[in-house]
Image (tube, rainbow, N blue to C red):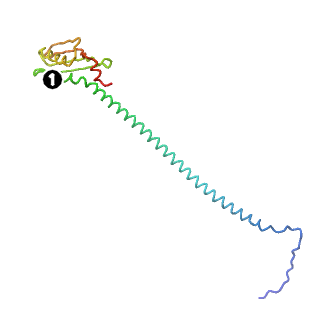
Amino acid sequence: MQITEHQIDDFKSDRKDIAPPLPVILRLVPILFYCSIAVAVILSSIFAIQFQLAVQKRDAHKAQSGSLASQTEQARNERAALESQIKKATDIQNWVASSRPMQPLLVEIARSMGPRSSIVDLRLDRDLDNPAQIKMGLRMGTDSTKQLDLTVEKISALNYRAFSPTQTLGRGELDYKATLVRKDPQQQLEEVPQ
């Protein structure tokens, strides 16, 4: 089928008051608009990702800070326990060192016991204010006062003097109490560590 020729009239009028077309440079405005929307979306997603990373880092730092605080507290508790043990050990060491001057006295009292005598109870108390004086309480299993004389003689050989001695004999036991004072108290004070 063939189309017949028709003449088409152009109703377009040539009007002079219509604005001229936009310059070429202004054609970039829509392109820049869409590009700015794309950049805004990209920057918003980067911001959201960085914000999430910052929140994770903050939480990690808070957890690490809490962990370090608990470790610090645990270290403080361990240190306090260790210092307590050190103090106890130092006290024991000082006690042993301060009892060293009394060791020869104890040895001589033990060696002075005869074959029929025995030490039932022996107490040596020393006052911190006056370490030159030793309060002695001795209970011996013996029937004779000769054993006590021998023991007192051995104590006197160590430069100790007995003040206000009391003795009680009964039921096969001899109870002796006295305050021993070293004849040269400076020597004993030099032996005692401060």
Most extreme residue toward the bottom is: 1
Figure quadrant of residue 79:
top left
Which quarter of the rendered picture does the C terminus lie within?
Answer: top left
- Disc 1 is placed on an element classified as helix
Q: Is residue 57 left or right of residue 21?
A: left
Residue 66's place in the image compared with 39, above or below, is above
Front-most of 139 and 52? 139
135, 180: nearer the viewer: 180
Left or right of 12 on screen, residue 101: left
- Quarter of image, res 90: top left
Residue displayed at 31% across by 27% down = 94
- Residue 75, located in which quarter of the rendered image? top left
Q: Label 1: how many residues lie within 10 Å, few (<14), some (14-19) or many (20+)?
A: few
Relative to 190, does residue 12 appear above or below in the rendering?
below
- Picture residue at 60% right of the left edge, 57% below the top: 46
Image vertical order of residue 30 relative to residue 52, above or below: below
Q: Amino acid at mark 1?
A: Arg
Q: How many numbered circles does the render carry?
A: 1
Disc 1: which residue: 111
Location of residue 146 in the rendering, given as x and y in whole percent from the top left corner: 12, 15
Instruction: Pick out the residue farthest to the left.
Output: 115
Q: Residue at x 22, y 24 (%)?
A: 103
Q: Position of residue 127 (x, y in %)?
A: 30, 18
Q: Is residue 54 left or right of residue 87?
A: right
Location of residue 23 in the rendering, given as x and y in whole percent from the top left corner: 80, 67
Q: Quadrant of the N terminus?
A: bottom right
Residue 185 location, x and y as percent? 27, 17
Q: Residue placed at 86% from the left, 68% from the top?
A: 18
